[in-house]
Image (cartoon, rainbow, N blue to C red):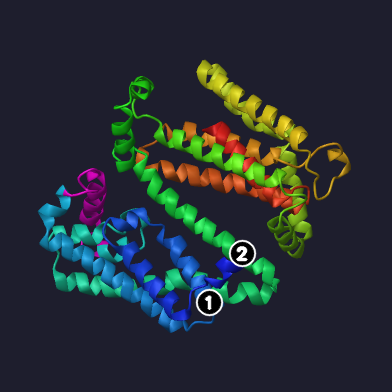
Amino acid sequence: MPLADMLHSLTPSPPLIICLVLVISLVESLALVGLLVPGVVLITTAASLAGHQDIGLAWLIGAAFIGAVLGDGISFSLGFKHREQVTQRWPLSQHPEWLGRGARFFQRYGIWSVFIGRFVGPVRPIIPLVAGMMQMSPRTFVWANLTSAALWAPAYVLPGYLLGRTWQHHLNLPPGLETALLIFAAIVVTLAVIFSWGRHQATRHGRLYRTIAGSIRRVPLLRRPWLAMSQTGDVPLASLLLLVIALGSLSGWTLLIITHHGPLEMDLLVQQLFAMLQSDFSYLAGNIFARIGDTLGIIALILPWAAWMLLSRRWEALLHWCGAFAGVALLNTVGKGLFGRARPETPDYLMGSFSYPSAHTSTTVVLVGLAAAFVAAEIPRQKRFWVYWIALALALPMALSRLAVGVHWFSDLVGGALLGLVICA
């Protein structure tokens, strides 16, 4: 059975989807665990599947409500009955700042913190635990828990449910394209879970970091470079892992491209979707982004950075940027010439130019990726992930614009993004 058909056949049944919504709501509200789980993404995905299968909305909201009440209730009970044990166990023993953040929020808003905190992402899984540790009245907590869950459940479920009810009817998607979108959604959810977990594990206090550090220190050949990187602070484990994962993924993806004659099946499906969504506005926006991603546009974007680095005499940073852009330009030129993949459409200004990898995408990923890294280094660690999400939001329109104007396959964009991540790492 083809992979696409197999994944499509695994679509959960209505009772299982309702149970999934309940479990996701519970885990997303559970003390500390909710910090590591991208609950919004998972809830939206499950609700979208429910809407697509016309599952009763009351069942779905009820499941989310029960899960949210149970999650907060368990968290409160842990803090109320096991205050000392909770603070001495992982992960609070390694991340006391999480508890401090929740305590400050609780002190600021008092009994309203339980109600308000459910809608504030960074403190949502912490507040019920802190409320219990602060010996908040159980009766007061129950009322705040029930009323906030009654508002939270529909607010989080309805957008995804509406999406699931309308995407097939209004877009009239072909069956093959619907399967491809389901697979893509599953990949996005999986990556979101991995990212949410991995960003905590790759820091000095993460278990993954400590495990790798302990293993390397027992190997004489690796001990010296590890200690050398430790002299300036944390070993850049996240960057090293990104390099390994991006380079391996780029190699595997490129092998898939060169061993497949013509566009991939997913390329044709995505091209069909963009053809259905084509409009004068999307074509105009695509051309604007295309101009921004050209050589002159990229130069205009990096000139302010270069001028600032020159004026502030940051020579190493300037060399870093110059090396990154020279490297991505060289690898794009070599890659296009080596693989010689034809474009879907080749306008006059692109005559003689090949498709894989997408230079616009790879260069944009390098630009926003390096900018995000420099900005993140100047702000507190707990806020850095917002910088990278913003960078992702800026790079995505540039990549998708190449599909809007019809000069790239979807797989070209994937290859370009992976190449950009390799250079960034």
Residue 408 lies left or right of residue 156; in this view the side is right
Q: Is residue 376 visible?
A: yes
Residue 320 lies left or right of residue 109; in this view the side is right
Residue 329 screen position, x and y as percent: 69, 29
Residue 2 lies left or right of residue 70; in this view the side is right
Q: Quadrant of the N terminus?
A: bottom right
Q: Amino acid at mark 2?
A: Ala
Kindly identify which residue carries mark 1.
51
Residues rendered magenta in the picture: 89-113
Kindly identify which residue carries mark 2.
4
From the viewer's perspective, is residue 117 above or below residue 424?
below
93 in the magenta segment:
yes
Q: Name the residue at 61% across, 64% down.
A: 4
Label 1 environment density (alpha carbons within 10 Å; few <14, some 14–19, many ≥20) = many
Residue 40 lies left or right of residue 232; in this view the side is right
Q: Is residue 150 visible?
A: no
Residue 29 screen position, x and y as percent: 31, 64
Q: Amino acid at mark 1?
A: Gly
